[in-house]
Amino acid sequence: MLVDGTLACPCMPEALATATTGLDDKAARDLDDKLEERLATREPYFLKLKQGPAPNGTVRLQCPAAGPSPAVSCPRFNRLHRPDAEPPAVVDLTNARSTAAHASAKPTVQISPAERLRPPPASQLPRICRKPTITVHPGDLGKLDKFRQDRHYLSPDWHDAYKPIRAHNEGLNGRAKGHRIDIADPKRRLAHGRVAQSILLALMICMINLQILHDWTRSNSTEPTAGDSEQAEHDGLTPIPLTTNGLPPPPD
């Protein structure tokens, strides 16, 4: 099951799987305590990464109830893959790490009463339930494959990765809509037709990229450039001073 871009246990409670349904941008930026608690509660149900991406993009994922350190306790997993009986161990209740590692401290996957009374054959269960570890290839999820992401949505790791990306995107949008290019102004794209509009837009974006490179060079280079002298010719990239009517001054 794909939950906010991450593959999860098919028995994840619906309340946790739909925790972010209908979430607006403001709520995503400033999470309340209730939503943070739900996001933290559903973390153990996500499939665990067993092996990182291969050169062809495949990854190995593991059932959260499998492995020497399971994140959840699942009666379905215990029925299909009977774990080896371990001798009783003494748990030090004063040790938080030892207490949290005990099976009774982990969330229990809830299955339907009908499955408990009449367990279905393994062939009718999801692939992750039949095999504790599965290989996911690019395109295995079909049209949902483009929504899969490696970081859990709205987790601290996700925020650390996407906040800079969003800031860069907003910065590019501001530069593109600034007075130097202003791709939003239809007066700068008077040609008719989709092809002509696409070509003009591509040229304007090319100029934005050239401006970024030029500004970076001017701010990081110690050598004088053509724009440093009032007598130098205009290089086509440096902003031209505007007059009171908003138009460039007439040429000399």
Image (cartoon, rainbow, N blue to C red):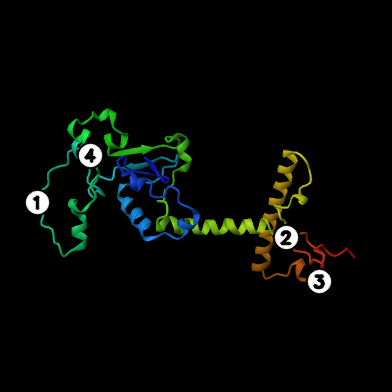
Position of 199 with respect to 97 (left or right) is: right
Q: Which label lies toward us, 1 or 3? A: 1
Mark pair 2, 3: CA separation? 22 Å
Q: Are marks 4 and 2 in contact (CB under 8 Å)?
A: no
For disc 1, the neighbor class at 10 Å (few under 14, some 14 to 19, many from 20) is few
Q: Earlier in the sequence, mark 4 or mark 2?
A: 4
Task: Identify the residue under disc 1.
Answer: 88
Picture coordinates of residue 218 (x, y %)? 68, 66
Point out the image quarter for the C terminus: bottom right
Q: Amino acid at mark 2?
A: His
Q: Amino acid at mark 3?
A: Glu
Q: Are marks 1 and 2 in contact (CB under 8 Å)?
A: no
Q: Which label lies toward us, 1 or 4? A: 4
Task: Identify the residue under disc 2.
Answer: 179
Q: Is label 2 in a helix, a strand or a loop?
A: loop
Mark pair 4, 2: CA separation? 61 Å
Q: Earlier in the sequence, mark 1 or mark 3?
A: 1
Q: Which label lies toward us, 3 or 4? A: 4
Q: Which label lies toward us, 2 or 3? A: 2
Residue in the foreground of this view, choosing between 219 and 146: 146
Q: Is label 1 in a helix, a strand or a loop?
A: loop
Q: Earlier in the sequence, mark 3 or mark 4?
A: 4
Task: Identify the residue under disc 4.
Answer: 77
Q: Is label 4 in a helix, a strand or a loop?
A: helix
Position of 141 with respect to 84 (left or right) is: right
Q: Which mark is residue 230?
A: 3
Q: Amino acid at mark 4?
A: Phe
Q: Is residue 57 above or below residue 241?
A: above
Position of 173 with respect to 192 (left or right) is: left
Residue 49 shows in this picture? no
Q: Earlier in the sequence, mark 2 or mark 3?
A: 2
